[in-house]
Amino acid sequence: MTRHGPSDLRFDQIEKTMKQFPDSIDLKPHNLSTNIFSVMGNLAEKHGAVNLAQGYPDFEAPPELTDRVHHYMRQGFNQYAPMPGVFPLRDTVSRKIHALYGARIDPDSETTITVGATQAIFTAFSAIIRKGDEVILFTPAYESYTPNIAWNGGIPVYAKLDPPDYNVDWDHVQRLISPRTRLIVINSPHNPTGAVLSNEDMLRLQDLTRGTDIMILSDEVYEHIVFDGTEHQSLLRFPDLAKRSFVVYSFGKTFHTTGWKIGCCIAPESLTLEFRKLHQYIVYSAITPVQYAFADILKDDRHYRKLGRFYQDKRDRFLGLLQNSRFHLQPAKGAFFQLLDFHDISEESDLDFAVRLTRESGVATIPVSIFNPGRRDERALRVCFAKHDETLRKAAEILCRI
Ligand code: PMP
């Protein structure tokens, strides 16, 4: 590969070209940059690159699931669902949570079906963050948290997770807690690092928040994708935490149906009441036939119980193919992302390196700095291994030549 100067991919320029409104229209300033996923996606397409940037699976949904959706569509289940979601799905979700995590969740007053985890997160933040409230986040962090908090007048307070393990330093978290701390956001398994919180982590969090008014938002969209015999430590296993928390799930991650945008939010009755006050006016309800289909499908645990093994095999095959590369690789413990640490390969920023890799070598990845406030450099790229083996083989072949 030839060396280039700083990349000519400028987010502010891309945005300028998108503003086509007449000057007389006063736009609301959001101070947000264009989403890196569309930028990298376009770049990958333009250069015919193997695309490991897209954070979603390449696989088809289970046919029995799409059959059930067709069935309910044909049977006329096509009008608005009840605001909190259809009862059979809320009921199945609460039974599943009991079977997996031992918690008794009331399907009527503690379970709300949402338009993906994205809407659940936005709604939970909007329901409880007041102007000036502090929200503790772990960085790198899933990209919607900071803007969602800021729109609600909250102040994000960052606790950094460090490579190679990206473990939480709870003593540091303790020092970040102030009288204004309203919420702590956790995400396990973690996007983008693949880190997983342990039982000890959850007990530390429980100790730290005991006797306070601090609430927790636990983003568990990758709950079924944990590796090497580890168990997912759902927050719902910890009653002292559960009584002050929103827990967010996504059916899209579990059933290879991210495009359906459907998930749920579990919270105690008082928090669910606040959540639904906004939910009713943000979306009112989620897609009806899909809810009924999931209500049927989730009764059978075989698909999601095999998911961890399925993705662990993918991770292992991918890491095996990369063993002669110059990247440093700490195997992901969960989710479907692997970090490629490139500090032995290039001095470039991760954005420049990712752009060059797409243009010159033909592999699209995501620079980890985009998950950091202020774009602090991470010297690592995120790749998604929820792809067909052939795609992973092609990408690995290229990455081994870097
Ligand atoms: N949280 C995390 C950590 C995610 O990775 C994603 C999806 N990329 C979401 C939430 C959003 O999930 P959904 O597609 O159900 O809105």
Image: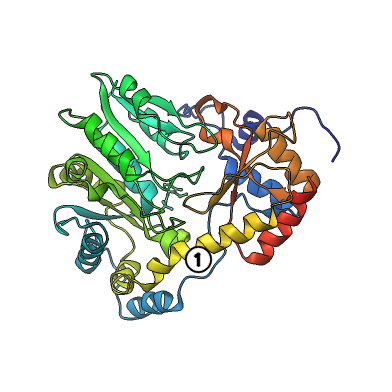
In the image, is 8 to the left or to the right of 188? right
Q: Is residue 81 above or below residue 264?
A: below
Give percent across and percent down for residue 51: 66, 54
Amino acid at pointer 1: Phe
Q: Return the residue nearer the eye: 33 or 238.
A: 238
Q: In which quarter of the image is residue 70?
A: bottom left
Residue drawn at the location 13% of the way across and 42% of the way down: 270
Residue drawn at the location 17% of the way across and 52% of the way down: 110
In the image, is 128 to the left or to the right of 252? left
Q: Return the residue nearer the eye: 325 or 241.
A: 325
Residue under pointer 1? 310
**Quadrant placement of the C terminus:** top right
**Quadrant placement of the N terminus:** top right
Give percent across and percent down for residue 206: 23, 36
Q: In this view, does 59 lie above or below 284?
A: below
Label 1 neighbourhood size at 10 Å, few (<14), some (14-19), many (20+)? some
Q: Return the residue nearer the eye: 294 or 389.
A: 389
Q: Quadrant of residue 82?
A: bottom left
Q: Can residue 309 be seen in this view?
A: yes
Q: Mark 1 falls on what kind of element? A: helix
Q: In this view, does 206 lie above or below 180?
A: below
Q: Return the residue nearer the eye: 67 or 306.
A: 306
Q: Does any atom of ligand 1 lie closer than 8 Å to the CB of label 1?
A: no
